[in-house]
Amino acid sequence: MAITSEGLGRHPAPETDPMQPVPFRVLRRKRETHDTFSLVLKPPSAPGPFSFAPGQFNMVNVFGMGEVPISMSGHSGEVREIVHTIRVVGPVTQTLNRVRAGGTVGIRGPFGTAWPVGAAEGHDVVMVAGGIGLAPIRPAIYHVLDHREKYGKVAILYGARTPQDILFLREIESWRARFDVEVEVTVDRASRDWHGLVGVVPGLIPRAHFDPGNTVAFVCGPEMMITFAVRELARSGVPAQETYVALERNMKCAIGLCGHCQLGPLFLCKDGPVLRYDQVVDLLRIREL
Amino acid sequence: MNDAVQPGQQRTLERGDLDRLIEALLKRGYAVIGPVVRDGAIVHEPIKGTADLPEGWSDEQEAATYRLQRHGGPALFDFTVGPSSWKRFLLPPRVQLSRAREDGQSAEMNEGAEPCPPFAFFGVRSCELHAIAIQDRVFLGGAIQDPVYRERREGAFIVVVQCGRAGRTCFCASMSTGPRASAGFDLAVTEIVEDGRHYFVAESGSARGAELLAVLPQHPSSTAEIGAAERATARALEQMGRRLETKGLPELLAASHEHPRWEDVARRCLTCGNCTMVCPTCFCTTVEDHLELGGATAERVRRWDSCFTSEFSFIHGGSVRHSGRARYRQWLTHKLGTWHQQFGTSGCVGCGRCITWCPAAIDLTEEVSALSKSGRGKERDGGIT
Amino acid sequence: MESLDRILAEIPLFRGMKEEHLALIAGCASNVRFEAGEFAAHHGEPADEFLVLRQGRMALEIHAPGRGTVTIQTLGDNEVLGWSWLLPPHEWHFDARALTLTRALKLDGRCLRGKFEHDPELGYEMMRRFAQVIVRRLEVMGLQLLDVYGDH
């Protein structure tokens, strides 16, 4: 089976041990929502600059405790800072939540496949995200907006549970303030104070402006949201071969040797997490695969 | 002492001289691991000579059954495979990957209890040799290699013992992994106990195997001796206990995710994971971080894991493979199906350990047969046939 | 002013319908408008019409004592509001309030139902298209119910 998303992004540098976390210093910590925060980390200067492609992830390690796979959520390429946006769901993320500027976290990476921002040049780009799913897609948004002239119409469609859960609110407003990007945000449920859209992310798709015959779509969020969003994209005429999704499974080694992240024949740590939808649609239909 | 031994040429080694082979390996610095009787089974442990080997012992295997029998004769290798496989040494059940301080500085590693490489594996069966080759593809064949496996594998000296009989759970013939090994070893010996003689027909499969054989007392095998070795292989082939139809198997499994047979096997399967532990190709592991007393250093440990555990596929508050049905299905469809897409071969070598060591007597050859009966390659709507 | 026939032809709900059917429907159609904050429908009141929003945004709301007003969903351009006109009891299931100045096409349910009696083919076409509207609405509600972003 040929996996034809952008191909593997960068690997950990060959001279490093991919199983050994490297301490990165925390430059800043930012509260994003009631259960989500971002850490801005400084890679050490040796053995070389940290480089990653949009969509890739690191294993973020708490010393002596454990690690979790977290996508990079900041600018990609060769960078002096990396950003991880993390939702508190268990003991490791709870501990990371208490880390402050000046502290360190262990990093292994980068791992995984990337959003095909290169192959998408010359096309319209629709980026659909739900909940914390906006974080792994943000590096792709940054890349597209930083190279705006290379793309056709650009639409960013985002959904959160409630208005309080909207991630990167100020930034979304700044994207919307641009004249060359279409931005729509909806929430699943809201109170009377919310004057924005109420409904689900797939519902934003028929209203967005793009040429379905020349569109590449990126979809990131809970798997159920992905399924419905892709269905809506298909209804609008975007084929599965031009739709890329980010999938998640349990990860331990992140280098394809421990067996945990398998989805059928795919190892999501190296064949994914970004995958072309037509190559996974049948796998996703099988219960408990 | 003897003329140059060519790889492939068969040479006869008398029983009395087999100790010299083990001695020669020890002298060359190898930690020689071989079959020994312990706790009612034949397992792999360090050996010093033929006295450590299971002379006079044989094994009886069936689904959920393993018994050692004492036949009392002189044969040293009259058994098939036990619960242990060579993966215990190449992919140790527990291995410390690193010790470090919080600032990233390495600390000295703890000493392991396992024998240190280089290993000489003495008594490798053909199925096991293929299992090692399969794990080679997993750990050495990808973009990222495993350094622990590589260190233990490189330089491992392999002495194959060709099978002269097959057990009731063996099906290497179906998987094209035996009964006879033809390549991939340093030395291969076939034990012959016949007409008052006890000898080994040996062949080398590598330069260092040939070099080692050359220093032992041996002579070119006679036609009769070669014939005896061939008869031993034929006997093993004849006695093969099980059969697995492999033609079209990956496609069958890919189309059978909703087959009612999974529900049937799930009623019997305890999800104990025995099969994954005894299987010589199962390679799943987990990584753990432990803070040591004092909190200044942390160790990273890699342990065997099993896709049968309920937490194996845990994400966000639930496991993807919640039911035992889904977990058994994962194991079987990976081993016999998706392994092909991942690594280019089947993941099964037909050693039969999973059948022997399953406490519920589940037989994967029987399960595959049942899966194929409701129309090969077709999805079923339901109803147990 | 653009004829209602032509307006109807552009609306996705009616796209592809025969001209004579569009003419029949136009006979039951009128333009309406709501100021921001104005209610288009009240929960429990007789529902003998449906709206196709042309411009603006409406919220479907339910008021629960102690909980206040809950917005179930918002609707925008070309979206359809109301299917209670199709089958008895003809009552609105929720409040519909304009969030912005909203222009819409109002279709008279009783008028339409009368025409279906004489032209079953028209009736079938409308039922078919409304079934799609309802299915899409159910999909949205289903996804909201699943609370996909929640901790599970």
Image (cartoon, coloured by chain):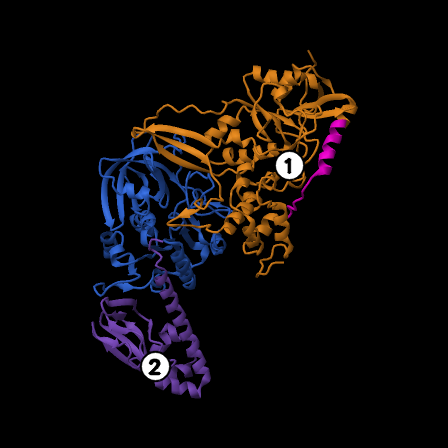
The quadrant of the picture occupied by the C terminus of chain B is bottom right
A104, A119: nearer the viewer:
A104
Type of residue at label 2?
His
* Whether residue C59 is visible: no
Query: How far across and how far down the image is residue B7, in percent?
Result: 67, 23
Label 2–label 1 contact, CB within 8 A: no
* Whether residue A284 is visible: yes
Which chain letter matches label 1? B
A200, A287: nearer the viewer:
A287
User: Which residue position is annotated with label 2?
Assistant: C90
Magenta stretch bounds: B228-248
Tag on residue B177? 1
The quadrant of the picture occupied by the N terminus of chain B is top right
In what element is the residue under mark 1? loop
Q: In the image, which lettered chain appears blue?
A: A
Report whether A181 appears left or right of B98.
left
Q: In the image, which lettered chain appears orange?
A: B
Residue at image position (31%, 70%) is C77
Q: Color of chain C here?
A: purple
Reply yes or no: does residue B112 show up in magenta. Answer: no
Reply yes or no: does residue B240 show up in magenta. Answer: yes
Q: CA distance from mark 2 to mark 1?
A: 73 Å
